[in-house]
Image (spheres, coloured by chain):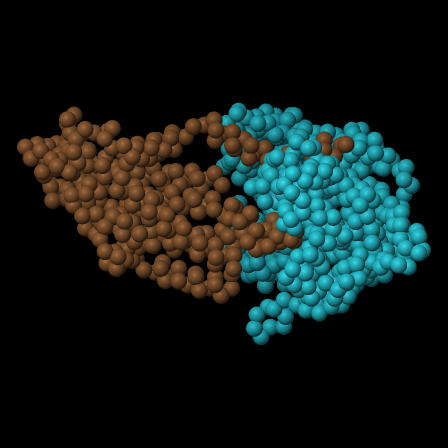
Chain colours: A cyan, B brown
Amino acid sequence: MTAPLLAIEHLDVAYRAASGPRRVVHDVSFDVQPGEVVALVGESGSGKTTTSSAVLGLLPGGGLVEAGAIRLSGVDLAGWSDRRLQSVRGARIGYIPQDPVSSLNPVRPIGVQLADAFRIHGRGDRRDIRARVLDLLDRVGLDDPALRAKQYPHELSGGMRQRVLIASAVALEPELVIADEPTSALDVTVQRRILDLIDVLRREHGTAVLLVTHDLGVAAERAERVVVMQHGGIVEQGSTAAVLDAPAEAYTRQLLADAPGLGEHEFRHPRPPLYLRDASVAAAENPFALEASGLVKEFSLGRGREPFRAVDDVSFTVLRGTTHAIVGESGSGKTTTARIVARFVTPDAGEVALGGEPVRALAGAAKRVFRRRVQLVYQNPFASLDPRQSVQEIIAEPLRNFGIGDRRSRAASARQLIDRVSLPAALATQRPGELSGGQRQRVAIARALALEPELVILDEAVSALDVTVQARILELLEQLQGELGLSYLFISHDLSVVARLSHSVSVMRRGRIVEGGATEQVFGAPQHDYTRELLEAVPRRAAADARGASDRPSASSPASPASPASPARSTRKALA
Amino acid sequence: MSATAVETRPSSSAPQFATDGRRRLRGIRPGLVLAWLVIAVVLAWAVVPWLFTGQDPISGVPAEKLQAPSLAHLFGTDAIGRDLFTRVVYGAVHSLSGALVAVTVGLVVGTLLGVLAGSLGGVVDAIVMRIVDVLLSIPGLLLALSIIILLGFGTVNAAIAVGVGSIAAFARLSRSEVVRVRQSDYVEAAFGSGARLHTVLFRHVLPNSLTAVIGLAALQFGAAILAISTLGFLGYGAPPPTPEWGLLIAEGRNYVATSWWLTVLPGLVVVAVVLSANRISHALGRNR
């Protein structure tokens, strides 16, 4: 075994607090060999970002390496001064930050920002640097580098900005690149291109990559070795294949089972609701909870400019008691569609029918009555709950708005709902600030259920949550659907989550629905190129297995039907 | 069920807030304590001045005129032998009640305008905010003087004039806060669950937008004391021999070369109170 490029030995990191130092990383040891890709995987708060920041000496204020060594080619960097570390940062260790939007200086052209890397480390004169910047921009796949170099960050898309950041990370051809969630803020197709780019650059220069990610799918697809972290410590580490095939620890097994793209789930074939099983009921009742037809919404871009068509002739239906998903990338119009259905946005054309009744023209009092039948759950549970109200007040609010019951009966209903979404009863008097993200999203779901709606719109309702929390919320949604016969309109960019929860799906692109139908059919045999592209972009286990094999396996079966007794499933059951 | 077991571990941001709160409770900030102490003493002066001094603020002993600070006369005496400390203590009620009136006028009218503009939007917003812009474009002292000339001299009128001057600041702040809160998901969620505009306004928007406004009120309290003293100094406030702080400093300026204490000591009291109000306002703002 060659000497490791980066060796972290018994690293302890703490943050100073009034109550004494709070240790957030303890006894973390792992190596990165030259040219190797190591993934550091864990939930938020597991200490993975703190660990990578410690390597760079970029711990936030109050952060302190208490013990342990960080050896780069055998030299211990821990305890080095900021000044001394500067000679290492950029030159020997490159860094790709998570958020491409806030990581570039908005008032300087990107070419100048890239040139900084060379200037700071005193490489080359002005003309030389300029040539190297253009070469870099070309290498990270930006078209017309000369033009791009003069552009400001706001003129570039998120994916392009991330390419610029990658360019600055690899500018000085470092031996190690630390990528901290490099693609978490990006769409799935862009994510794939960025990860491919990192792969290519790595192969060209033999750079080692420390990939920090919460997405086990990304880790499985790209990394040779995986380090799983939880609560600031290492749970398990080893080669990707070994860890994924035979996880030794319960936590790793749970992560695997919960990762939507990795765990093996069947497509949902629901027990048909009563009206479908009983022909007479079926004949009497409208089988659709929601029918949307020909929806159009345009946004004005100012005088003299063509209006932007966010939603263009969109039609879909949601069968009673089932989940219909709308998938697409950001900017595809899926959220606008959801907001039209929820009547927060009025469409320019088209009709929405709820249980057969047209609702588009509703206004005033009639619209308020309609609100009882459709509820929306928001993406960000940190913004959708009033921070000044208690959980019980939040959940009872819809009842109060419609004057249902008195104070005491409303409190009782709130307590029932808290129980229904599997939250401890003691939470009722707490405020959202004291709750975790998953708990808050449960509160939001309970509030949506308070009025016993027919349709619940879930707008990216699990996207902001860690995988294990996400999996629990999905289970809750499935369970509630079974118990209450709810219909869901599920808006998501995450195809693996959609594959798990939805019965039918519409794929949206640039305001139009390009393909729709039963989830199994659409994902199993996609007809449209765009659907295929989306499906291929989902990072998944299969690709990692194929590492070394001649080519990628067929991407047409992202979540192939598996027997219910597959190991992943039974593991999750055992833990639950 | 394992769900709760997994989720009860708070997310990364939650413990930070918790330790923040603990730090605030544990680490007593001496500056803030001092600020509250100053305000408490001055309030006590305003409410029960006779407990702090046994002398008369209006009639003096001519034989003891222009004495330097001593144990008998803490702040010295003025040109007609009145004890300056007594006058400062009895003056607190004028300055404080003036500041209170000024802040109340600014807070109530300004917040009302701001909340109306922020929650109704559209034409109302445009009209109200343009009026506020006009108010802001007039220098504060000029505005106050114009209003006093319209209303007549006197402590209360001076206070109202100062209050009108702070309407613009309150309106702008409360409008921006209301607009921020109105755009939040939880307000939309409230509408989505059937709440009407006034319900949302009182249940969600006001409680969440007023913290910053209260911080500003504390800041304005200090500023108002200063402004009222300025008006008193210029002779637009309380008439002599009222022991109002600004007036005290104005009366002392004729003797600034020989009897420094007549201007410096009341001036220091004003400085201490204004700084304390600022410190408290800062703390209120940070508690958000």
Residue A375: horizontal and vertical position, in percent?
70, 52
Residue B114: horizontal and vertical position, in percent?
45, 55
For the point 63% across and 61% down, the residue is A364
Q: Is residue A365 above or below residue B216?
A: below
Residue A563: horizontal and vertical position, in percent?
91, 41
Q: Which image quarter holds the C terminus of chain A? A: top right
Please give left or right for residue A441 compared with residue B199 in the image.
right
Residue sitting nearer the eye, A182 or B122: B122
Please give left or right for residue A542 compared with residue A74 in the image.
right
For the point 33% across and 54% down, the residue is B165
For the point 60% across and 73% down, the residue is A305
For the point 82% across and 41% down, the residue is A263
Instruction: In the displayed orientation, state which residue is furthest to the right.
Output: A279
Residue A33: horizontal and vertical position, in percent?
71, 35
Q: Which image quarter holds the N terminus of chain A? A: top right
Please give left or right for residue A118 compared with residue B240 in the image.
right
